[in-house]
Amino acid sequence: MPSRKLHNLLNKLLLQDSFSWVSGYVDEPFAKYRHRHRVLRHDSLAVLYILERYGIRASIAVWLHLLLDEDKELQRDVEAIETLKHVSERSKGGA
């Protein structure tokens, strides 16, 4: 399962906002249901619910959350971007 940090990074890259609260909403059932939590709020109804209440950008963040949860290659790509970001930040700090 991708970390909240990876979800936030993907949203920040594509939507210019981390939409951290969206991942919190989508994954809230994890506390009770653990890895079975994906039967709740991990579907098109969650996307539509957020669209209706908060607008298109937030609903795209839900869709990106679902995509990242399922797509292992995308997870690796976002992890690589995160690593490059850290390397870049360290090199700027050390220069």
Image (cartoon, grey):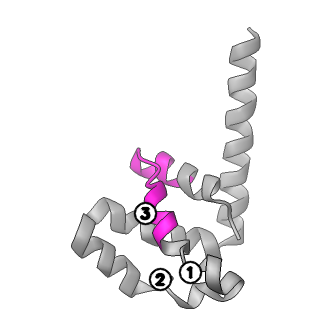
Q: Let me know if residue 63 appears in the view.
A: yes
Label 1: which residue?
Answer: 29
The picture quadrant where one finds residue 53 is: bottom left
The residue nearer to you, when weighing 89 against 27, is 27
Q: Which residues are magenta?
A: 10-25
Q: Let me know if residue 55 appears in the view.
A: no
Q: Residues within 10 Å of mark 3 (few under 14, many from 20)?
A: many
Q: Secondary structure at mark 3?
A: helix
Is residue 53 one of those drawn in magenta? no
Give the total of numbered labels: 3
Q: Secondary structure at mark 1?
A: loop
Q: Are marks 3 and 2 in contact (CB under 8 Å)?
A: no
- Seen in the picture, residue 76 relative to 17 is either above or below; the reply is below
> Which mark is nearer the camera, 3 or 1?
1
Left or right of 61: which side holds 91? right
Residue at 68% across, 65% down: 2
What separation in Å lies between label 3 and label 2 (alpha carbons)? Answer: 13 Å
Q: Which numbered marker is on residue 41?
A: 2
Of label 3 and label 1, which has the lower sequence position?
A: 1
What separation in Å lies between label 2 and label 1 (alpha carbons)? Answer: 8 Å
Of label 2 and label 1, which has the lower sequence position?
A: 1
Rendering coords of residue 63 (x, y %): 45, 71
Q: Which numbered marker is on residue 61?
A: 3
Q: Are marks 2 and 1 in contact (CB under 8 Å)?
A: yes
Residue at 26% across, 65% down: 54
Q: Secondary structure at mark 2?
A: loop
The residue nearer to you, when weighing 62 against 35, is 35
> Which mark is nearer the camera, 2 or 1?
1
